[in-house]
């Protein structure tokens, strides 16, 4: 359905029936989406436990060691810059899937790096994924959460980020302890610092699975003119009737596409 021919199908004034169990569903979906924040924290911090061993392994100067660690920030800037535009074209959930793939590939590439420049390239790739996750997760949560708990749910991204940092450092410490040091070999004759980077594959795979199961943002669907799909998502997530969901979609469409703010219409929740 094209934007130019779309006409709202339900009145867009007044309120909708309050949801009953929708908050629980919205919280569950928001927690799932916040895994991107976990990966943000995990991938940005996991190299801290490995940097000493990496410096020794590749005989890096202090400058090169610093560049290797900081290279992820370059990718982060790129990912954050382009994430919004790409998400508007292909959808929030698909962009999450792209980020998950980049997280997974960069984790494996970093763990198998054969030179400092190779590692730097993979860290930049991880940074792109971090930048995407930092933009998409809070945006998606804000677009799918009920109004009365939206602020709390968008904070999940920051909570997940901090948990990711904690888990990455805990993982680094555990792997170094098992091997007797980050530079020592561990399972299958692979150095512990490589395992520190490889373990990021696990949450990346979890994120990829989540990205395939959560619903697309109703705001994105409404902007594309996919009215019934957007209403179906809202009805399921917020646990409201399909008519109430259609009324809410009309509000979204008028505001997002036409720039019209509907006064007196309340968001479920």
Image: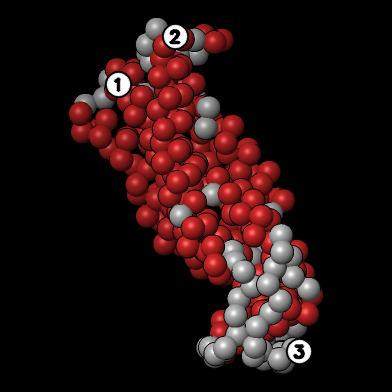
| Mark toward the viewer: 3 or 1 | 3
Which is nearer the eye, 44 or 191?
A: 44
Please report whichever mark, 2 or 1, sits nearer to the chain's N-terminal start: 1
Instruction: Give the residue drawn at x 57%, y 32%.
Output: 201
Between the C-alphas of marks 3 and 1, the distance is 62 Å
**180 relative to 211 in the view: left or right:** left
Disc 2 crowd rating (10 Å Cα; few below 14, some 14-19, many 20+) is some
What SS does tag 3 mark? loop
Residue 149 in view here: yes
Is residue 193 positioned above or below 35 on the image? above
- Residue contact at pointers 3 and 1, CB within 8 angstroms: no
Which percent across, then down, holds residue 234? 70, 69
Is residue 11 positioned above or below 57 on the image? below
Residue 91 numbered mark, or none: none
Mark 2 highlights which residue?
179
How was this image coloured? secondary structure
Between the C-alphas of marks 2 and 3, the distance is 64 Å
Is residue 43 positioned above or below 138 on the image? above
Which percent across, then down, holds residue 263? 54, 90
What SS does tag 1 mark? helix
Mark 1 highlights which residue?
52
Residue 9 numbered mark, or none: 3
What SS does tag 2 mark? helix
Is residue 228 positioned above or below 167 on the image? below
Instruction: Give the residue drawn at x 40%, y 19%.
Output: 173
| Mark toward the viewer: 2 or 1 | 2
Please report whichever mark, 3 or 1, sits nearer to the chain's N-terminal start: 3
């Amino acid at each position: 359905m094209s934007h130019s021919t779309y006409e709202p199908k339900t009145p867009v004034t007044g309120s909708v029936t309050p949801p009953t169990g929708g908050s629980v569903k919205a919280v569950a979906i928001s927690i799932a989406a916040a895994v991107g924040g976990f990966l943000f924290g995990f991938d940005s911090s996991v190299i801290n436990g490995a940097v000493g061993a990496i410096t020794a392994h590749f005989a890096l100067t202090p400058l090169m060691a610093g560049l290797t660690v900081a290279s992820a920030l370059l990718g982060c800037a790129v990912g954050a810059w382009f994430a919004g535009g790409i998400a508007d074209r292909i959808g929030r959930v698909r962009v999450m899937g792209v980020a998950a793939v980049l997280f997974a590939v960069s984790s494996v590439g970093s763990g198998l790096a054969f030179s400092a420049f190779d590692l730097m390239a993979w860290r930049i790739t991880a940074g792109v994924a971090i930048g995407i996750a930092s933009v998409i997760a809070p945006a998606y949560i804000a677009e799918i959460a009920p109004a009365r708990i939206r602020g709390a749910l968008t904070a999940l991204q920051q909570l997940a980020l901090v948990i990711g940092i904690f888990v990455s450092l805990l993982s680094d410490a555990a792997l170094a302890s098992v091997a007797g040091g980050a530079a020592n070999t561990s399972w299958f004759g692979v150095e512990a610092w490589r395992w520190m980077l490889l373990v990021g594959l696990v949450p990346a795979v979890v994120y990829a699975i989540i990205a395939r199961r959560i619903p697309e943002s109703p705001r994105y669907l409404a902007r594309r003119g996919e009215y019934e799909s957007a209403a179906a998502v809202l009805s399921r997530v917020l646990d409201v009737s399909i008519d109430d969901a259609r009324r809410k979609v009309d509000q979204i469409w008028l505001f997002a596409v036409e720039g019209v703010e509907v006064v007196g219409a309340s968001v479920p929740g």
